[in-house]
Image: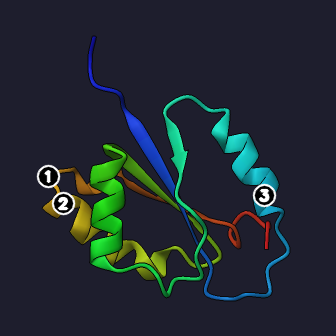
């Protein structure tokens, strides 16, 4: 049996004035096999150590950063992900503004 291809979804919002139903989004994502949701933060808790622990503890093979400005933290996530022996191209963004969600 091969290793699981676990994807971690991190939410990042630079603006607290968003109108999303994160609870419902989290519940939906929990039903997708091999996807884990990292607890929501407004960005202040994202440090290299916190990200590294999540990558290692959950054996993440891919990261999705979702929010209103996920590009603001992509560099940090990519640096930590590569340092953990993963591929930079497996750090993906979902920008809610570009999709008209916020």
Quarter of the image holding residue 7?
top left
In the picture of the structure, the residue carrying the numbered disc 3 is 23
Callout 1 crowding tier (Cα within 10 Å): few <14, some 14–19, many ≥20: few
**Count of marks overlaid on the render:** 3
Residue 82, label in figure: 2
Quadrant position of the C terminus in the picture: bottom right
Judged left or right of residue 72, residue 90 is left
> Vertically, is 62 above or below 91?
above
Are circles 3 and 2 on residues that touch, CB within 8 Å? no
The type of colouring in the image is rainbow
Are circles 2 and 1 on residues that touch, CB within 8 Å? yes
In the rendered image, residue 6, in percent from the top left (x then y), is placed at 40, 38
**Sequence order check, earlier mark of 3 and 1:** 3
Judged left or right of residue 80, residue 61 is right
In the picture of the structure, the residue carrying the numbered disc 1 is 85
Callout 3 crowding tier (Cα within 10 Å): few <14, some 14–19, many ≥20: few
Residue under the point 35% across and 27% down: 4
Quarter of the image holding residue 96?
bottom right
> Vertically, is 2 above or below 33?
above
Rounded to the nearest angstrom, the CA distance separating label 3 from label 2 is 30 Å
């Amino acid at each position: 049996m091969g290793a699981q291809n676990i994807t971690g979804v991190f939410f990042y919002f630079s603006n607290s004035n968003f109108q999303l139903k994160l609870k419902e989004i989290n519940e939906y994502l929990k039903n997708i096999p091999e996807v884990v949701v990292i607890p929501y933060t407004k960005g202040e808790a994202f440090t290299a150590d916190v990200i590294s622990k999540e990558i290692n503890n959950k054996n993440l093979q891919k990261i999705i950063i979702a929010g209103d400005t996920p590009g603001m933290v992509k560099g940090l996530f990519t640096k930590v992900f590569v340092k953990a022996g993963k591929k930079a191209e497996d750090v993906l963004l979902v920008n809610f503004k570009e999709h008209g969600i916020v």
